[in-house]
Image (spheres, rainbow, N blue to C red):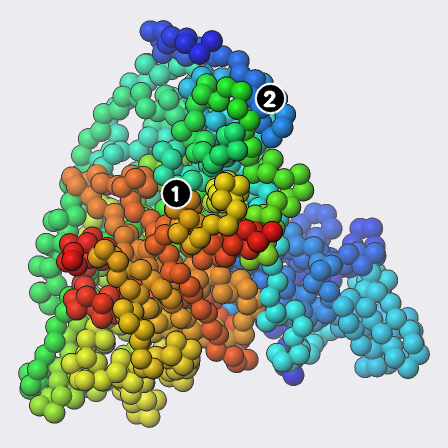
Amino acid sequence: MHSLKKNELNTIAVATFNLKINGKISRVDVDPATPMLWVLRDHLNLAGTKYGCGIAQCGACTVHLGGTAVRSCQLPVSAVGKEAITTIEGLSAKGDHPVQKAWLEHDVAQCGYCQAGQIMSAASLLKSNPKPSDEDIDNAMSGNICRCGTYTRIKAAIKTASKR
Amino acid sequence: METANTNYNRRSFLKVSALAGGGMLIGFNLFSSAKAANLVPTATPPGEAAGLTSFIKISPEGKITILAPNPEFGQNVKTAMPMIVAEELDVDWQQVIVEQAPFNTKLYGRQFTGGSQGIRQGWKSLRTAGASARQMLIEAAAQAWQVPAAEITTEAGVLHHKASGKSAGYGAMASAAAALPVPKDVKLKAVNTFKILSTSHKNVEGTNIVTGKPLFGLDYRQPGMLIAMMVHPPAFGQKLKSFDATPIRKMPGIQDVFSIQVYPDEYERQIFDDRTFNELVVIVGRSTWEVMQAKKKLRVNWESMADRVEKENAFGQKREVTIPGGLESTDAHYAKMKERDAQPAKQLRRDGDPEGAFKSAAKVIERTYTAPFLAHNNMEPLNCFAHVTPEKAFLAAGTQAPDFIERTIAARLGMPIDKIDIQLTRMGGGFGRKAYCHYMVEAALISQKMKAPVKLIYTREDDMTYGIYRPMYSLTFRAAFDAANNLTGFHVRGGGIPESPLGRSEGNFPAGAIDNYLADEWALPSNITIGAFRAPRSNFIAGAQQAFLDEVAEAMGKDPIDFRLELLERAKKNPVGKNNTYEVDRYAGVLKLVRDKSGWGQGNQPGVHRGVAVYFCHNSYAAHVVDLSMKDGQPVVERVTSAVDCGVVINPIAASNMIEGAVVDGIGNALFGNLTVKDGKPDQSNFDKYRMIRHNEAPKKIDVHFVQNEIDPTGLGEPPFPPVIAALANALYKATGKRLYTQPFGPQLGKSIQG
């Protein structure tokens, strides 16, 4: 199914994918090369995952693939397979994941556009490293750009979340 | 206690009416005291807002809804403005529901976001509206209870009459209050009695943001919506010659490929109609990915443009501007700026005898500072939803200037202005860029052509290479000293491509503090377009001027803060010249506060180097001390101490956030920000080449302090940004022994400080 060839007219074959997203199976019929970012945004109406650069340089599109943070703009739908995807909409049922709560407590957001990606990166970090040092936070978070400059609050919020 | 007259316009500023299902509607114009042209409408809008504006609603159940009028891009105005109303209305903030007002100039007055003016201009209107509503509720209760109004008190949305023990919620009196006349004068609360203001309240959109709700323009969608992308010339100075759409027309999902002319040939540009490329190729399709694939395969031929003349109409001032043809390059720009800087310039200010002071000087210090084009790089790339039918045009987008672009869209589509309906979405950053809304005109034209709802999306590359940059700037400072090492003369020469950073700042410090003072400027034309970028002009002046004053202080053997305070003392006791725009005590106030809070002069920690800077712009004062250490040739910012005087602080937690962000933004742009061009083509088109400050480069700690006073509040979005650049530069000098004169600093540090 994933080895379809492009023909001379550049028409790209569409394939069917059954994706496990936020605990549910979602079916999409798309070009296998389509990045998960656009599958989520255009086909599944999950707009919390943001487009920022399209080349995995800004982190706005960060989602979890099998529990690990990945940049969905560089993740073709054909590479997902049976791995579970979690987006910001599915991080918690009621918006009460410790990272989300810490974000509210520190009033982190300014424009807010990058924050879904920041939160997904932070949640993934804390899952693998529940008590990160400042350096650990820098290493895990430096792929996420915040144009408004909320970095110091993000770091404080991650530390608050790590205490829960 | 301050008294506000509710009739301070030629028409009534405030009107109260009954809500359809009972309750009270208090409408007013936000900026009614600011600008006559945007006053009360003559047309009567339909529905419950009939008659006037619609800002506060009190339902019979006591539900309080406040509409936030201004576009939101992170300055937190959607929380701050309703807080001001709620304070004077005297309600419990937890019970207030905040809604974003749809865009409607006729209803809401001037909804412009820029110049850090939102709170400053809205302060009196917002307070008066809240206080008037409260006074009318008191009157209604007084009539119902047959007691004197003066004996009625309010607290948290409840009316009390102590003597009789009667009390009622606002909702119970709202319908009756709506039938009363609007009071002529109302008393405003004393600043020291504020309960909601000057207390921290979380962002009203906080939960929606952390749960990924579709708040932004890019998230907006409607059934049957098509996706559009555009292709613009790769280089400034080029235009469309021809394109071959054949290879992409049959690609999956592609609906149409065509070109659009954004403005007609003879179009007279308004102030924000800045456009770079007037003819674009457009690809429309079903989904973003499909359109992106087609965009990569489109074959386009471009051609160079000759010099051209554009008509401009800036707030009624008509002029013709010649835009040069040709393909420009950054290297040539720097060479031309240097050459031009040595020629005579247009004088802006002259005090005393500056030429004489330099002629008789025992010593002169002269330094030239330069800075590059900067791209705004908002995290949300430009986008706009449009659905244009013969009857009307509906648009949904993030825009800082809806009332400007509304006129432009109406003119371009040939529709009356009341057929243009703009829904304001939250903006994923603005920083000035989203005042230039060519993307909205483009989206409207595409929808009109497709006869369908369309969302135009710029790729990151489209966004970064379109132009509307912060200009390239040059400032040359000269200081004259007599034989006793006194500062006797000062000369600042500003220049830039295509505008000088001076012009509107000739009354700013240190003018007024030096006997013999000269300011002049020049500019070089360019076909690279520029626009407002957080704290326009100041964003360069502060960094250069405050670094130069550091050098002057050093030459005079003085502490940098003591030296600035001496100059300010002079400007206070015996000011030089006229039109000095700053208040000396407030200027000195932030310097003293940052000195005390940072522990300036009390001995540095080993390996930690400090720099200070202070600046006044957009009506507020800001000073920073940067503490940094060096690691592998690059700075590690250990701490930034900030002191700000913006009058009354509306919402401290958000105000601090804004200042922290400005500090990070300033350090980031000073170290890395750089948009260069070669043969007209930007060298950077995405974040792999355009360095943005990242987590590991941000200050470890930012301590924010406010000057406590009761002065009417002024803006915060811009003022803290410019001076941090100089505080960083001055600290870097302490760390490395080298003064840096060219931004960005980062690349020079790597080379100069190895080992």
Q: Position of residue A106 (x, y in %)?
A: 55, 58
Please indicate whether residue B128 sits to the left or right of residue B629 in the image.
Answer: right
**Quadrant occupied by the N terminus of chain B:** bottom right
Residue plotted at (28% across, 72% down)? B606
Q: Position of residue A102 (x, y in %)?
A: 58, 53
Few, some or many C-alpha atoms within 10 Å of disc 1 (few <14, some 14-19, many ≥20)?
many
Please indicate whether residue A60 sits to the left or right of residue B231 in the image.
Answer: right
Q: Quadrant of residue B150?
A: bottom right
Residue plotted at (31% across, 60% down)? B636
SS under mark 2: strand
Read off the residue under disc 2: A26
Q: Is residue A123 above or below residue B73?
A: above
| Chain identifier of the residue bearing label 1 in the image | A
Instruction: State if disc 2 and disc 1 touch (CB < 8 Å).
Output: no
Can you see residue B274?
A: yes
Give amino acid for label 1. Answer: Gly
Q: Nearer the viewer, mark 1 or mark 2?
A: 1
Q: Position of residue B576 (x, y in %)?
A: 27, 87
Q: Is residue B478 above or below residue B318?
A: below
Few, some or many C-alpha atoms within 10 Å of disc 2 (few <14, some 14-19, many ≥20)?
few
Q: Which mark is residue A143?
A: 1
Earlier along the polypeptide chain: callout 1 or callout 2?
Answer: 2
Residue plotted at (19% across, 40% down)? B680
Please indicate whether residue B204 sits to the left or right of residue B476 in the image.
Answer: right
